[in-house]
Every structure is written in C-alpha cells, then in structure tokens.
Amino acid sequence: MDNFLAELRRRNVFRVGAAYAVVAWMLLQVVNNLTPALRLPDWASSLVVVLLMVGFPVVMIFTWAHELPPETATTSPAANSKLDWFLSSALVVVFALVTYQQLAPARSDETPRVEGPSLPGPQAGAISVAVLPFVNLSSDPEQEFFSDGMTEEITSALAKVPGLIVIGRTSAFEFKGQNKDLRAIGQALGTTHLIEGSVRKNGPRVRITAQLIVADSGAHLWTENYERELTDIFAIQEGIATAIATSLRVPLGLKPGENLVNNRTKNQASYEDYLRAKALVHSRGFQSINAAAKLLEASVARDPDFAPAWGYLATAYRLVPLYDPVRLSGGTNEARLTVETSLAKAQTAAERAIQLDPTHSDGYDASAAVERMRRNYISGVDLYLKALALDSNNPDVLHSYSITLAELGYLKQAVPLRERLLALEPYVPVFHTSSATILWASGRTDAAIAMYKSPAAREPGVGLAMVYASQGHHVEAADLLQSLRGDTAVRADQLQAAARLLRSASAATAPPQELPALGVSGWVYLYAGEPERVLEYHEGNLKIGYHGGIDIIPLWAPSNAPIRKTQRFKDFVRAAGYFDYWRARGWPDQCRAVGADDFACD
C-alpha cells in the first residue's frame, strides 16, 4: 500500500485530483448562476454535474496511464511544496463554502422587491417553502389543469411534514406566468425555499422536473427528473415531497406504513376529473361550481373509494347556494329548496369522505360548514377543531373557523387566526378583505383601512365603503359603492340604490317605508334612520336555511351598537342559534347573561 501511494504521488495523481475538484466546483457555481439568467432548460445543471462526475475517473485514469513528468524533473522542491499548499488550501476553502451553502445560505442585500403585503417573516430557524406553479410543457394547452394539479398535490403532501411551513397554493399561484427573480418571489412570499418545475404529459406517459432552490441566494439544492407512466403519478408526487424534505433535513414524521400522498386512485379518468374540478372550485362562480360538482360526481361514480374527490364534492355542493341567482334575487321558496338539497348532498359527501379517510381535513371542513349554516354551532365548531387538529395550517379551515368565531362575537379569538392565515396565504383577496372586516368590527379601524387598501385585497369593495360610512364619510362611501360593478354575490342594482340612499341619508329625502331592498348592502339603512332594517338580509338568509359567514360580522362593529340594543337583534340572535352556543361555550366580549334566560349586548 505504501508503494502504491508513493506511485500515485510520483505520477501527480493527487495533485490532478485536487485541481479537478476545485475547478469543478468553480464551474458549478458559474452554471448555477447563469442558468436562471440565460433561461437554460431545467436539466442544464444536472447535465454538468453528471459530466463532471463521469469525467473525474477518466481524468484520474489518464493521469496514471500517461505518467505526467515527476516532480524533480519539472520544478524545485520549494515550488512543489507551494503548489501542494495552494491546492490543499483551495480544497479546504471549497469544502467550507459547500458546507456553508448547505447549512447557512447567505442573504443578499440586493434582493429585488415585489410589491405585496407586509408579512410576518418565518420564525428564526424555521424552514418554509412555496411550490410555484409547475410549467405546462405539454403540446396541449388544455392540460394546464394537470400541471396546476401537480403543483397543488405536492403542496398538500409537503404540508403534512411536521415542522415545515408551506405557503398556500393560491398565494404561490399569484406568480404564475411571471418572469420575476426567484429571490424577489421568495421575499414577497416570506419563504426560505422555493420549488419550481415543469410537467410534460404525452399520452400515457408523464415527465415531471422539480428543483429546490434557496430563496435568498438562488442556489439549487436539489433537482430531479421523473419520467413514468401516468399510473405512477402518485409515486412521483411521493418521491418529490420525500426528496425535498430530505434535502431540507426535515424529518417526515411518518408512522410505519404511512405515506405523504394517500387516497390514491387507480382510475386515471377519475383523477383527472378531480384535478379539473379543483381548478373550477378555485375560480368560484355559479357556473364553475356546478361544473365542478358534475365532474366530481363522475369521479366518485368511477371510483367510490376516492376520498379526496368526496371531500371536494362536499365543498362544491355547499358553495352552490352562495352563488345561486335565485337566492340572491330573494326568491324565498325556490331558494330554500336549493339550499336544503345542496346542504343535504354536501353532508352526505362529507360523511363519505370522513368514512373513507378519517385523517383528511377536507371532509371535516365541509361538514363543519354545513352544520354552521344549519345553526348547529356547537357541532360545527367541534368539527372545525377536528380539521385543524389534523392539519393546523389548512388555509381553508383557518379561514372558515376564524370567520365562524367572529360571527359568534369572539373577535379577539379570531384575529390571531387571521394573522396566521395571512402568513400562510398572503395573496388571497378574500382572505384580506375578510380579515379587514374582522379588524374593523374589533375596533381597529386604521388597521382595517390599511388592509382593505393593500395590493393583495385588489378591489376593496363594499367593506371599505362600510368603514368610510362608519366614520361619517358618506360621500366617499357612496362614490366607492357607485364605482363597483357587482358580481354573483353582490347585485349591481342594489349597490347603486345603496349609493343613492347614502348620499341622501342626511337629508332624509325618502320616508322609511319607501326605502328600497338593498340585500347585502343593507348596512346603509343605519344611516337612513332605520337601523333595525340592517337585519333584513340576515333574517332572509335564516328563512331559507343559508345563514352565517362574513356578512354577519359587521353587526359587531362599534358603529352598529344601536342595532345590538334592539329587541329585533335579540330575536335574531336566538333564531340564529348564537344564544344557545354562548350559554354552552361562554359569552363573547360584547354580550353578557341577564338572569336565567336573557342577555344584553353593548
């Protein structure tokens, strides 16, 4: 062995190997920095790594076989000693830099900024990731739903890893199709790492490329290509999520036999219908929700044991009445039938989802929403708590549960949940406007206005007009209402009527009995001398069985104190089921018990 080592030294094999390692590392740094700037394909960095790995033994064999001139024949011993010292030092520096890149990535002071909400950054030492929308490289643009679905499925799988903070799907999709610097995106999302990739679907085969990137430096920690049959899609998702967690040195926290990707289906058509339906549910609207329900019905018909499809079907069913034009137009009897049918179907689907997979939060979330709308608040809250116990960072559950708490008057409990939600999903407009409404109702008017006006809220809408009116700025509130176009949840004609009434409120030009029906904009009645009529819209929803949600929360605002002191408000509270919940679970901040069977609210 001593003779062999001496021969390696004599033939300069050690020196060539050290020089090769240093030059290879420098080359990798150049490639990693040029790849995003030159928009090189995903496999460019991987190709360089493979070539360098293959090249190393080739160079070593070549050095041995061709016997480079020995030391004494070329340079003096002093010069050879300096060369050895330089190569040894260079190897130490390279090893130190590689270790530093892996354990403590440097932060750049010149990170580009992306305009967005002010977010609480991750806790010191916390690892957070965002899965950016995978690029659809399929020849058919209509396969976009599939690449979007892969993004969402990998996000869901990573969210199951304990100790790993995963930014919500909707906020990550805010950057879809944008050619922005990855460091800027990481800063805007408040995340330490980013995952990006591409999907190419060709007949029965799929090719998925994924890579893990340090957000503040752009360094690539891991990249991999997967090319398999579509029947192996769940194994690919599992492989990507596991490899990312391993690269981040985060324990998976799985029990024996558990996977990050569960509830797999062998029916490819059912799975693709499920992915298409999820995209439609995200887009909202009456037609989209109905189309999603039909796709999910087909999915569970093919595979009755596919739990995620049942969970999303329950969500679609319970959302149908929210956008139903009959309900919005005030057609009581027909609307009641739609609501009863939809909620019954939603409950059945939710129960099936829970039966198939008691560890999946979607079924509990949908079932909780049905119970809430049926005024069964105790069971509804308990179901939300079960959903959060299974997935404490599920944005949809955090949103629904915190709104339910605020609706019941527990504003102080709801605010921290909203802050947690916005840290996970910083770019969802409805999350921002709902949070602003809760802040306003809790007396934090300045913070509410700032949130309504933040870029993430996009169109502040009715909520900001409501706050302006509470400050006595009726003209500004009316101008804002009149500028709104209306949508499937807020009728344009009622917005215009509310704006006109608000302008004339101080002059009282219309007798109370002639005030128009304003629907969700009925808060304007407060400034027309008819505070009790603010309750009309909510009482109508009680009659048709579709009650609760964000529209109730303004009743707790300081400006609505006159309403809370009326008998009509007390009757509404009893009919809505709030009083029963308060007696069972404790009184909210602004209300208290009076005697054995009465209450008062400030």
Image (cartoon, grey):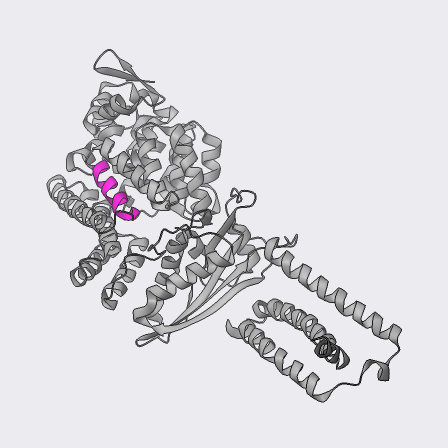
Between 426 and 24, the one nearer to me in the picture: 24
Residue at 62% x, 67% y: name it.
Answer: 33
Residue 162 visible, this orientation: yes
Q: Residue furthest bottom?
A: 66
Indicate whether residue 372 is drawn in magenta: yes
Q: Residue furthest top?
A: 595
Q: Is residue 492 left or right of residue 39?
A: left
Between 495 and 381, the one nearer to me in the picture: 381
Q: Please state, as top left, top right, bottom left or bottom right, where the N terminus lies in the image.
A: bottom right
Report x, y in % for residue 472: 42, 27
The range drawn in magenta is 359-373
Q: Is residue 299 left or right of residue 178?
A: left
Report x, y in % for residue 402: 35, 36
Above/below status of 211 relative to 368: below
The image quarter containing residue 420 is: top left
The image quarter containing residue 53 is: bottom right
Report how many numbered discs are placed on residues in the image. Answer: 0
Above/below status of 559 relative to 225: above
Between 323 and 95, the one nearer to me in the picture: 95
Report x, y in % for residue 414: 38, 33
Q: Please state, as top left, top right, bottom left or bottom right, where the C terminus lies in the image.
A: top left
Residue at 66% x, 52% y: name it.
Answer: 109
Residue at 47% x, 41% y: name it.
Answer: 453
Above/below status of 170 relative to 18: above
Indicate whether residue 130 is drawn in magenta: no
Above/below status of 364 relative to 301: above
Prevalent SS, magenta region: helix
Residue 501 visible, this orientation: no
Between 475 and 105, the one nearer to me in the picture: 105
Report x, y in % for residue 327: 19, 43
